[in-house]
Amino acid sequence: MNTQSNAVPDSPLGAQGIAPAAMSVTRPMYWSVRRELWENRSIYIAPLAVAGFALVGFLIATIGRSLSTPDLAERRTILEEPYSFATALIMGAATIVALFYCLEALHGERRDRSILFWKSLPVSDLTTVLSKASIPFVILPGLAFVVTVATNLIMLLLSTAVLKGSGLSAAALWAQLWLFQMQLLYHLVTVHVLWYAPIYAWLLLVSGWARRAAFLWAGLPPLAIFIIEKLAFNTSHFAALLRYRFTGPEEFDFTEPGSSFALHPMMHLNLGKFLSTPGLWTGLLVAAIFLAAAVRLRRYQGPI
Amino acid sequence: MKVIEAIGLRKAFGATIALDGVNLGVDEGRILGLIGPNGAGKSTALNAILGLTPYQGQLRVLGRDPWSERDQLMRDVCFIADVAVLPRWMRVSQALDYVAGVHPRFDRAKAEGFLAKTDIRHASKVRELSKGMVTQLHLALVMAIDARLLVLDEPTLGLDLLYRKQFYDSLLNDYFDRSRTIVVTTHQVEDVQHVLTDLMFINRGRIVLACSMEEFESRYLELTVRPEHVAAARALKPIHEHQVLGRSILLFDHADRQQLAALGDVRTPGIADLFVAVLGNKVGQAQGVVQ
């Protein structure tokens, strides 16, 4: 779940052996991330629950439907269908959890006054904000990937059993799965982490700044800018900018049917094009500015 | 080196001046009580010392600038800001794990030893504990940290007498030694009278009294005057006078004990009585005790 866990011994006595410099960076970071997982168990419960539902659905509906089809070719087609759907459900759950998590991350600790406890420990504001940012940027995509792969694998094993029972080979399904998973990983990193980074960073910043109703503050300023721009200049560049951020560059519109969740093979080939999209880099720059502002803000913040 | 050294510490919130040029020096091994009415600037002063709020003027805590080096400073400084700041969702075992994880000077065995003397179970969540138990837990965490400065801001607010007594007893018996320093603010001054080594009154962002407890005991006397000597006692210029059950109680600064003893019963006043005398509505007299 977390690569840093390898570097950190579990026993507190082990800390004595670590060089102070290493101690000051990795250990507080590791424990801060664990702390987030303790507090927000929905981070792993939601994707797992959705995966469970998808599996039950697969077991009842798909397997049942395929077994009731006498046509063997159709039986195979039915079994191939639900992979994208299950993947989309898990990713959707992870994204929703990420959005709500970000809005709450720096707000909850001020509301329940626990910020005074966190600040009484030798953990810097930078470490705290980065540990919170790691949830939407590292933990949730990683978790979504692992859960999706595991779910697909279970589905595949079930399909294989059904196909074998019908005297069919499942080799084609297995071959597709590998490619599918690589595409999924690519999709997660490019779209969910890199492209959407400024959205998550904005929500984190708002959660650190708003005294109440962080949800409203996240949406109102963009809406206000849109309205003012519309009234003053009768243009909608800002809305276009937001749309661009949510849907992606035209060349690979994430929301176009068949491209986002089915993970169009062309996306896989377009890494160079993706990396040379200016919007990617301005987005990452904006995300970095938002996060830096959130770190700075946390220094000034106390209980609300 | 002073543990805390402030020169001309100032802090304003808009037009409200919370700290108005405070000078402060706290030596190692002292237990300082910072006493003042609500809104006097106590918490602001502590927040500045803890790096929780920016300020004007010079401030060094253990040689560091708290505002820019908070995370470094917190290796040597602990604080209990209030009774209710431990996150309610956290389990006791998680609190131990987390502090052990991030704090290089935390002795987990020691914390578990303190907890073993209480009814707190490791599997409990903070929200399931009573207010007194949460304070015990926080104190167990803090006392297991080998820190040089402990700051307590109203640590026993809302606790019953038994927990309060236990809190200060543990602090003195199990934690405090001459190499540590404690700064405490509280409204329950009678609880800390015999705990403190130094006393400081703060009002409207200014320090109005600063003395050691030895000095306090030698300087201030409270006279329960016999009715026939009231006029004579008043002639000795008490700094405060109030009536209890029809008898006049007079508070003196720098008076001759022998002389007072002839007029009634003499004893060392409570901090609360001096507090009322100094910060009561008689502003002119309050100025008289400023050092």
Image (cartoon, helix red, strand yellow):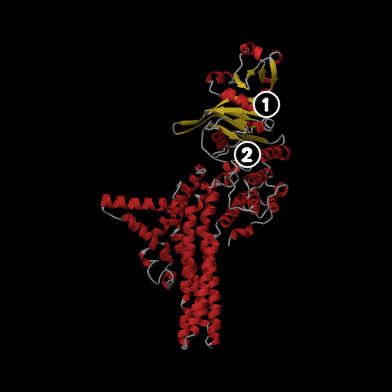
**Numbered disc 2: secondary structure:** loop
Same-chain status of marks 2 and 1? yes
Give coordinates of residue A20: x percent, y percent.
65, 48
Sequence-wise first label, 2 or 1 = 2
The chain identifier of the residue carrying mark 1 reads B
Give coordinates of residue A24: x percent, y percent.
61, 49
Separation of residues labelled 2 and 1 (CA atoms):
22 Å
Check disc 2 and report the residue beneath it: B156
The chain identifier of the residue carrying mark 2 reads B
Give coordinates of residue B68: x percent, y percent.
54, 40
| Quadrant showing the C terminus of chain B | top right
Task: Identify the residue at image location x=61%, y=29%.
Answer: B25
Near-viewer residue (A228 or B213): B213
- Which amino acid, by three-letter code, is at mark 1? Met
Task: Identify the residue at image location x=66%, y=19%.
Answer: B224
| Quadrant showing the N terminus of chain B | top right
- Which amino acid, by three-letter code, is at mark 2? Thr
Check disc 1 and report the residue beneath it: B213
Task: Identify the residue at image location x=60%, y=58%.
Answer: A4
Give coordinates of residue B256: x percent, y percent.
69, 14
Asked whether residue B31 appears in the rendered view, the answer is no
In the depicted structure, whether residue A54 falls above or below residue B169: below
Looking at this rendering, what residue extends furthest in the front direction? B246
Near-viewer residue (A84 or A175): A84
- Front position among marks 2 and 1: 2
